[in-house]
Image: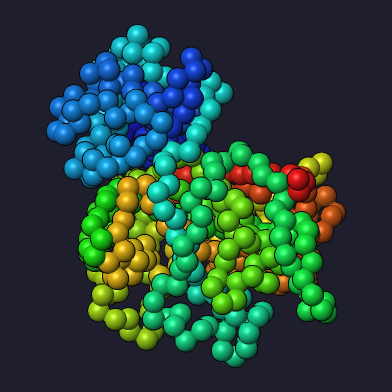
Amino acid sequence: MKSFIEYQKESDFSIHNIPFGVAIFKNEYIACCTRIGDQIIDLASLYELSYLEGIEELEENVFEAYTLNDFIELGKEVTVPVRKKLQELFSEGSLLEKDEKAIENCFFELDEVEMLMPVHVSNYTDFYSSIEHATNVGKMFRDPENALLPNWKHLPVGYHGRASSIVVSGMDFHRPKGQTKAANEVAPSFGPTKQLDFELEMAFIVNKNTALGESVTTQEAENAIFGMVLFNDWSARDIQAWEYVPLGPFLGKSFCSSISPWVITLEALELFRVASPKQEPEVLDYLKFDGEKNFDINLTVSLTPEKGEETIICQSNFKYMYWNMAQQLAHHTINGCNLEVGDMYASGTISGKEESSFGSLLELTWRGEKPLRLNDGTERKFLEDGDQISITGYCLKEDIRVGFGEVKAKILPSK
C-alpha cells in the first residue's frame, strides 16, 4: 500500500497503522479521528461526507463523540472493515485523493488539534506479567534464591487500580504526598514522596460488555480486545512500601497513570506477532492457548530534566512478557467478573534480561544503590521535580513500521 498523504519513512503512523483517537479540532469541536504521518483526519466529518458508506451496522455517526467507546462497542465486525476502508481511502488513486473539498474539511495539521483521552476507562486492572521484573523485585525485597512467590508461574498476578486518575499524554501532575516509614524510623511520617518512579508498561482496551458470571477463554480473548496504548504506571515507591501489606498497592499508585493518545488496533499489529516465552511448569487448561500471542514492540524510555538534556534510560520490548494478553483476560474473567467497554488492562512493568532493558528506576538504580548518570552530568536514584519521562514504542518488519507515538508527562512540585 502507498498513501497519497506524504509522511516520513520513520513515522509511527504509516498507512499500515490507522490508529484511532479523539481530538479537539481548531474550530473547537470534539470528534474521533485517525492519523497518517502528521495529518489528523476527522472521522465524524468523513462519515458525514458518505465516505464510510457500505459498512454494515455503522448506521449512525458514532465518530461524533467525546470518546471511542461507542465505536469500539460495535465490535470487530465493524471496526475491522472501517480500518480497511480508511486504508483504501488514504491510498493513491482513491476517490478521496481527488476530493479537494473533503480534504480541506477533514484533514488537519498536527499543531491544529489537541489530543484527548481516547476512551472512557470504565475499570482498570494492572498486571505483573514480566518474569524479569518480578524476579528483580523479589531479589531486592525478599530471598534472592526464591525471588518469585509460589503463585507467580501459575497465574497472571494483578490488582484493580484507579480508573479515574488515568490521563492522556502531556498532562503533567504534582508529586504525591502520603505516609512513609524508613527502616530506621520508629513511626511513619507524612510528606511528599522521595521515591517517585516510572513504570514502562503497555495496556489493552476491551470492546465488549459481558454478563456477570460469563468468562472469556484464551481463544475468544483477542476478539474482545480493540487495541493497545503505551502506559506509564507512575509509582511512589516509599508510599507503596509502607502501605501495600496486606492488600496491595493503593495511594502509591492511584495518583496518576499516563497513556498515549492513539489506540493501535490488534489488526495493525498482526505482522509483528512472535512466540511467547516458554511457560514452566505447564499452566492449567483454562490458561493454555494456541498460536503466537506476543508482539515484537520496541520500547524506549527517556528522562529530560527541567533544564537539562534528554537521556535514554531504558530500551525494552513487549515480547518479553511471560503472561500474554489472552491469558490475562481469561484469568481476569474466569471467576465470572464482567467486562465493560473501555476497560483497560495494563501489562505490568516490562523488563528484559539486560540492565538497560529494566523498565523502572527501582530496577535501573537497584533501589537507589546504583544512581543513574544522565547526559547533563546529574544523577538520579528516583525522579525529581521538573523531570519529564517520555515513552515511545514501534514495530518494524520488512520496512513496514507501525508505532504508538509517545506518552510523556512532567513532574510538578507537590501542592
Residue at 27%, 66% in the rendered image: 336
> Do we see residue 227 in this rendering?
no
Q: In this view, does 358 lie to the left or right of 102?
A: right
Residue at 25%, 61% in the rendered image: 212
Residue 80 horizontal/vertical position (percent) = 24, 41
- Looking at the picture, the colour scheme in use is rainbow
Residue at the right extreme, as displayed:
377
Nearer to the camera, 126 or 162: 162
Nearer to the camera, 125 or 230: 125
Nearer to the camera, 404 or 385: 385
Residue at the front extreme, as displayed:
187
Quarter holding the N terminus is top left
Q: In this view, does 102 lie to the left or right of 234?
A: left
Above/below status of 273 relative to 75: below
Residue 291 horizontal/vertical position (percent) = 26, 66
Residue at 72%, 71% in the rendered image: 367
> Do we see residue 358 in this rendering?
yes
Q: Is residue 152 left or right of residue 15?
A: right
Above/below status of 108 relative to 219: above
**Number of dots carrying numbers:** 0
Above/below status of 373 relative to 188: above
Quarter holding the C terminus is top right
Residue 67 horizontal/vertical position (percent) = 39, 35
Residue at the top extreme, as displayed:
101
Above/below status of 154 relative to 289: below
Residue at 62%, 47% in the rendered image: 390
Residue 333 horizontal/vertical position (percent) = 30, 65
Q: Residue 282 sits in which quadrant?
A: bottom left
